Image (tube, rainbow, N blue to C red):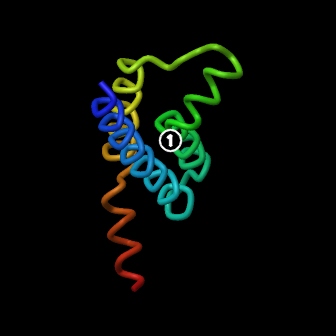
Amino acid sequence: MKNKSVFWDVISWMFGVIVLVIGLVNIFRGNDPFFGVFIALLAFVYFPPVNSLLKKITGIRIHFILKILLGLFILWAALGVGELFDKIDMMLMEF
């Protein structure tokens, strides 16, 4: 049981970092930095220490299914509407 928990914690950390990077790209290269701030704040839902703190303070735990749905929304918004790949290309051209 412990190995399963560690596996999901690692997956959660990785997805949280990916979403945070998507948010930062949108903050600094997007035409709507508030969208980037919104995405970056949503990234904290995926970090296990934030979940523990939220549960400790409020007693509320964000369910796994809700995290999956939120992740799909974030990916749809960033890749489709947010044109993430175009922004990354612009950033790479500057180097």
Q: Amino acid at mark 1?
A: Ala
Q: Position of residue 95 (x, y in %)?
A: 39, 85
> Which is nearer the eye, 51 or 1?
1
Q: Nearer the viewer, residue 27 or 64?
A: 64
In the picture, residue 28 is in which quadrant? Answer: bottom right
Count neighbours of disc 1 (C-alpha within 10 A) and say few if under 14, some if 14 to 19, many if 20 or more.
many
Please provide percent x and percent y for residue 43: 50, 41
Q: Residue at x 50, y 36 (%)?
A: 48
For image coordinates 36% across by 66% down, the residue present is 88
Q: Quadrant of the N terminus?
A: top left
- Furthest residue toward top: 59
- Number of numbered callouts drawn: 1
Q: Is residue 16 left or right of residue 37?
A: left
Depth check, front residue: 93 or 40: 40
Q: Nearer the viewer, residue 33 or 57?
A: 57
Q: Is 63 situated left or right of 8 in this image?
A: right
Q: Residue at x 35, y 80 (%)?
A: 93
Is 40 placed above or below 29 here? Answer: above
Using the image, determine if residue 11 lies above or below residue 92: above
Looking at the image, residue 49 lies above or below residue 69: below
Coordinates of residue 61 in the picture (x, y in percent):
53, 17
The answer to whether residue 91 is left or right of residue 28 is left
Report which residue position mark 1 lands on. 43
Measured from the top left, where is residue 8 in percent x and y? 33, 34
Report the residue at 35% width, 52% height from top: 83
Q: Quadrant of residue 58?
A: top right
